[in-house]
Image (cartoon, rainbow, N blue to C red):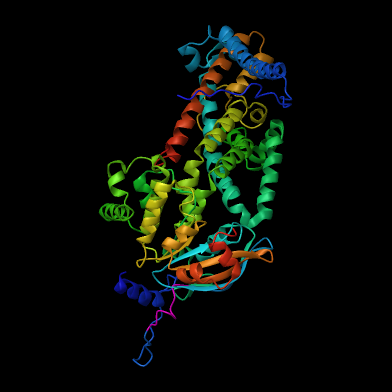
């Protein structure tokens, strides 16, 4: 784990906000500067976060905090609001008509739902990978270049370097370097999913959200993608929703368990992977992780 | 080697298909019969046109001016007028149509009432008889906007008529684009406008082409809406503000008002059919080329 990189992320994370406006220049004296404690400056915090679809709650009252550079797995049965929870992080909830978010989500101390938040910048910082690989019907190269061009990266050479860099990062470069200009839809499912991860990483996000990234893939591709996610530890803050408890146990540093209670999803357990799998505090979690339920 | 032997009487249960085999065959036969009948009608019409019309069609028929009220001579001015009217119609309806379709498909959930209102009015417009469009065009473009009987007024009237078809087809095309492209684009921080431009419109190009083909078909075949707006003067138009007779009006005039004009009416109809096929082909190629610049399908 690259400690320097994490510290760097923490430091810049505190200062940078999601607005394009230049940060106000304030004179800081030495006595004002407080050392940053990693335990109190998490990457993501939620305070009694909830979400309703047209008056029906999907999940309620979720408060947790996620550390920089860690991998956090969210597990639980279907329909308990795990995906909805992820979508609150990058405000994809804006796209769903009749959807209302309550409570607060802060990423790097910036309130995601504040009116001052620039959604485009937010989504560049918070990448998301979906359950079904969704490359655009463009060439492999254009898939990565299209979002980059939106952020003003224009130089052919620079684009080429980024494309090669991220494809190498996801282990796809050797497989596709000779056919970058062919359709991304011709790739296999696992390759498509890795391309989607490369496309998200190209924007240099801080946080990467995975919504059941392996559930549409065969076991071998699934393993490749899983190793890839494990390799992101330390460099990115990763939140992964999965149905696969074994995968959560292999990957995650922290695990959150969602369960439906009183008609809506709740976070019934949150702790380190070891805690949740070995000494869960909630009896439901015990039954769930030991395969007696769910 | 293991031989799979089914136990005797393995199918002896009480389950039998409710649909007897003869009924299934009948349905298949009917479906084929209906399809064949439709094709036969098309073949009859085209055959009739070719049979009666091909004798008159020649290069001079296509480029010459008509003589003797159209009984003799050619249809040069009508082809030019039809082309101009269609150009005006498409130049107005395509940008307006694409814009409205994008609004309805992608942005109307923000203004639900507005979206419903636009859709309702389009559905009503699509069902309005063309003669009513003709009256409206005559009153609004020719009289109120003082365009007179002109190709411009005719083209604009046709644009009003074509818009509902075009918009609804393009909207359906955009809506049929998989939701995962929208989510994927949004998650990468693409604004909705950029997503529409780079992904949704290109992916919706089949819908756009259907809209164009249907719209052009309706426009080029129109007579009622044009008689009152673009007029039926047979001379060669010199500008968009000149009156001009379209091919369809020429056919109508020859077959209804001119005794002995039937042969040329057939020939004109044949030319019209060929024009329609060619224009549709060109429109599809152009639309596909413009929209799918970088789109690569499998």
The residue shown at (45%, 58%) is A247
- Start-end of magenta stretch: A36-44
Residue name at image x 64 percent, y 32 percent: B229
Instruction: Out of B129 and A241, give the one closest to the viewer.
Output: A241
Say left or right for A164 vs A39.
left
- Residue situated in front as seen by the camera: A265 or A9: A265
- Magenta-drawn stretch, dominant element (helix, strand or loop): loop
Q: Where on the picture, by quarter, is residue B295?
A: top left
The percent coordinates of residue A21 (x first, y second) are 42, 73
- Viewer can see residue B15: yes
In magenta segment, residue A45:
no
Residue B188 to residue B95: above or below: below
Where B142 sits versus A218, above or below? above
**Can the viewer see residue B68?**
no
Q: Where is residue B215 in the image (x, y as percent from the top left)?
A: 58, 33
In the image, A106 versus B126, the foreground residue is A106
Q: In which quarter of the image is the C terminus of chain A?
A: bottom right
On screen, residue A24 versus residue B265, left or right, reads left
């Amino acid at each position: 784990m690259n400690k320097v990189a994490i510290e760097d992320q923490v430091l810049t994370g505190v200062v940078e906000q999601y607005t394009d406006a230049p940060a106000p220049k304030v004179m800081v004296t030495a006595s004002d500067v407080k050392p940053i404690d990693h335990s109190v400056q998490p990457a993501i915090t939620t305070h009694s976060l909830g979400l309703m679809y047209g008056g029906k709650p999907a999940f309620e009252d979720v408060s947790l905090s996620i550390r920089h550079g860690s991998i956090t797995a969210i597990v639980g049965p279907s329909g308990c609001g795990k995906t909805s929870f992820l979508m609150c992080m990058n405000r994809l909830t804006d796209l769903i008509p009749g959807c209302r978010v309550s409570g607060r989500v802060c990423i790097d101390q910036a309130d995601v739902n504040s009116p001052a938040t620039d959604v485009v910048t937010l989504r560049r910082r918070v990448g998301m990978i979906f359950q079904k690989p969704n490359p655009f019907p463009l060439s492999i190269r254009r898939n990565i270049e299209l979002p980059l061009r939106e952020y003003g990266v224009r130089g052919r050479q620079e684009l080429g370097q980024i494309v090669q860099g991220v494809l190498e990062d996801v282990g796809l470069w050797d497989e596709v370097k000779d056919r970058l200009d062919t359709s991304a839809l011709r790739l296999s499912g696992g390759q498509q999913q890795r391309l989607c991860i490369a496309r998200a990483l190209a924007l240099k996000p801080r946080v990467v959200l995975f919504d059941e990234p392996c559930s549409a893939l065969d076991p071998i591709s699934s393993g490749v993608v899983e190793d890839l996610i494990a390799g992101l530890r330390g460099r990115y803050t990763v939140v992964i929703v999965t149905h696969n408890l074994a995968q959560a146990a292999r990957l995650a540093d922290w695990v959150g368990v969602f369960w439906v209670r009183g008609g809506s999803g709740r976070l019934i357990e949150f702790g380190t992977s070891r805690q949740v799998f070995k000494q869960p505090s909630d009896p439901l979690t015990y039954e769930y992780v030991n395969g007696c339920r769910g | 080697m293991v031989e799979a032997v089914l136990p005797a009487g393995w199918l002896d249960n009480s389950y039998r298909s409710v649909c007897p085999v003869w009924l299934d065959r009948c349905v298949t036969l009917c479906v084929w019969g209906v399809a064949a009948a439709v094709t036969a009608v098309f073949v009859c019409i085209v055959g009739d046109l070719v049979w009666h019309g091909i004798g008159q069609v020649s290069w001079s028929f296509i480029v010459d001016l008509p003589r003797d009220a159209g009984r003799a001579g050619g249809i040069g001015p009508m082809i030019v007028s039809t082309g101009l009217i269609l150009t005006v119609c498409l130049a107005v309806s395509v940008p307006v149509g694409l814009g409205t379709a994008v609004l309805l498909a992608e942005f109307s959930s923000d203004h639900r009432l507005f979206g419903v209102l636009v859709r309702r009015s389009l559905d009503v417009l699509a069902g309005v008889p063309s003669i009513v469009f003709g009256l409206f065009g005559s009153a609004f473009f020719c009289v109120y906007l003082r365009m007179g009987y002109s190709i411009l007024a005719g083209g604009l009237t046709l644009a009003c008529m074509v818009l509902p078809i075009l918009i609804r087809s393009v909207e359906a095309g955009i809506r049929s684009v998989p939701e995962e492209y929208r989510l994927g684009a949004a998650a990468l921080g693409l604004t909705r406008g950029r997503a529409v431009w780079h992904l949704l419109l290109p992916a919706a190009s089949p819908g756009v082409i259907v809209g164009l083909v249907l719209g052009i078909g309706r426009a080029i075949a129109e007579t009622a809406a044009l008689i009152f707006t673009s007029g039926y003067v047979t001379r060669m138009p010199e500008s968009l503000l000149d009156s001009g007779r379209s091919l369809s009006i020429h056919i109508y005039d020859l077959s209804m008002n001119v005794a002995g004009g039937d042969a040329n009416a057939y020939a004109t109809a044949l030319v019209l059919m060929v024009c329609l096929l060619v224009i549709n082909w060109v429109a599809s190629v152009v639309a596909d080329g413009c929209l799918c610049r970088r789109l690569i399908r499998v």
